[in-house]
């Protein structure tokens, strides 16, 4: 009985040994096929992940640039509104300045009352102009300067030989700028070339 059990154990051990020897070869054959497929699959997934990451990065950069542009436009709009929001009010106030200037030009020095009134008008006008200057509202009075269509409006042209053509010879109404931008052009008279006297030829000579 003991001999039979010993023989059975030897047979079992022998069978296990053969199985252990064959299993690594079988696993190796399986791993060789599966490893190659797994690597290719992982490589494909990696490429896909890289492409998605690049796409997301591009979207993020575009969104950031667009946000930056929106912020800059908003800042420009706020600055523009801050600078030029007074334009309509200025246009309403300028006729008051014109009236004070005309009153000052029309007043004389006939008596003390007229002198006092003139001084009051002049004081009021100066205070008004200083208040406008605080808000970057500057007058445009280009007499003697070349005509500039961006700042001046020609009312008429006169022949002038004393000055260069296209020179402003008279300002009928001052213009004004707000932060360097024209609010009202100056109304001016511009010189043009006159007919100069030319010596006549004596045909009978």
Image (cartoon, grey):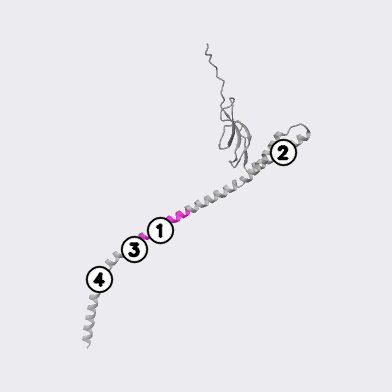
Q: Earlier in the sequence, mark 3 or mark 4?
A: 4
* Snapshot quadrant of residue 6: bottom left
Q: Quadrant of the N terminus?
A: bottom left
Label 2, secondary structure: give it. helix
State the extent of the magenta-drawn residues as a range.
Answer: 46-64
Q: Which residue, given by chain and number where applicable, does mark 4 sit on?
A: 26
Q: Which residue is mark 1?
A: 53
Q: Nearer the viewer, mark 1 or mark 4?
A: 1
First in sequence: mark 1 vs mark 4? 4
Q: Which residue is mark 3?
A: 42
For mark 3, give the secondary structure. helix
Where does residue 151 sit, x and y in percent of width and height?
58, 37
Q: Is residue 184 depicted above or below 32 in this figure?
A: above
47 is within the stretch colored magenta: yes
Side of 85 where 13 appears, left or right: left
For label 2, the crowd category at 10 Å Cα-Cα, with few meaning under 14, some 14 to 19 and many 20 or more, is few
Q: Position of residue 55 (x, y in %)?
A: 41, 57
Spatial CA distance of label 1 from label 3 is: 16 Å
Q: Reading the chain from its start, which is encountered first: label 1 or label 2?
A: 1
């Amino acid at each position: 009985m003991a001999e039979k059990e010993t023989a059975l154990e030897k047979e079992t051990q022998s069978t296990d040994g053969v199985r252990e020897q064959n299993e690594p070869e079988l696993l190796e054959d399986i791993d060789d096929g599966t490893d190659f497929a797994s690597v290719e699959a992982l490589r494909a997934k990696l490429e896909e992940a890289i492409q998605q990451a690049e796409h997301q990065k591009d979207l993020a950069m575009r969104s950031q640039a667009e946000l930056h542009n929106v912020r800059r436009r908003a800042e420009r709009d706020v600055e523009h509104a801050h600078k030029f929001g007074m334009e309509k009010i200025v246009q309403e106030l300028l006729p008051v300045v014109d009236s004070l200037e005309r009153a000052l030009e029309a007043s004389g020095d006939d008596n003390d009352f007229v002198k006092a009134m003139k001084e009051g008008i002049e004081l009021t006008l100066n205070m008004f102009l200083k208040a406008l200057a605080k808000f970057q509202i500057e007058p445009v009075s280009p007499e003697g300067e070349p005509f500039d269509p961006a700042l001046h409006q020609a009312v008429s042209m006169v022949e002038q030989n004393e000055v260069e053509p296209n020179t402003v010879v008279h300002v009928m109404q001052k213009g004004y700028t707000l932060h360097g931008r024209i609010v009202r052009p100056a109304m001016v008279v511009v010189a043009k070339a006159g007919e100069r006297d030319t010596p006549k030829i004596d045909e009978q000579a």
